Image (tube, grey):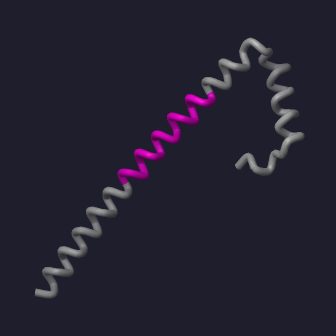
Amino acid sequence: MFSNIGVPGLILILTVALVIFGPNKLPEIGRAFGKSIREFKKATDGITEDIKEELKADIKEAKQEEINLKK
């Protein structure tokens, strides 16, 4: 996502953010952004775990049905 920005683009974005928000507000914004990213990762990890558990249950059920069909 951010791989196309490059160093000059990143410096420009940081400079604009510094001018708009000022040096006192910038660390607060950074912390808030970091917390948001962290919460998003937790949510996606939770969804991923739920999907994995459902797939394991489906595989187990399919194997059980296969065993029952062989009998």
Q: Is residue 70 above or below residue 62?
A: below
Q: Which residues are magenta?
A: 33-50
- Give the prevailing secondary structure in the magenta stretch: helix
Left or right: residue 56 versus residue 6 is left
Left or right: residue 69 versus residue 55 is left
Q: Number of numbered discs present?
A: 0
| Residue 49 highlighted magenta (yes or no) | yes
| Residue 34 highlighted magenta (yes or no) | yes
Q: Is residue 50 above or below residue 35?
A: below
Residue at figure coordinates x 22%, y 69% from the top left: 61
Residue at figure coordinates x 74%, y 46% from the top left: 2
Q: Residue furthest bottom?
A: 70
Could you say where residue 31 lies in the image, as x and y percent from the top left?
62, 24
Could you say where residue 7 lies in the image, as x and y percent from the top left?
85, 42
Q: Where's the C terminus, which quadrant?
A: bottom left
Left or right: residue 65 versus residue 44 is left
Residue at figure coordinates x 80%, y 25% from the top left: 17
**Quadrant of the rendered image containing residue 65:** bottom left
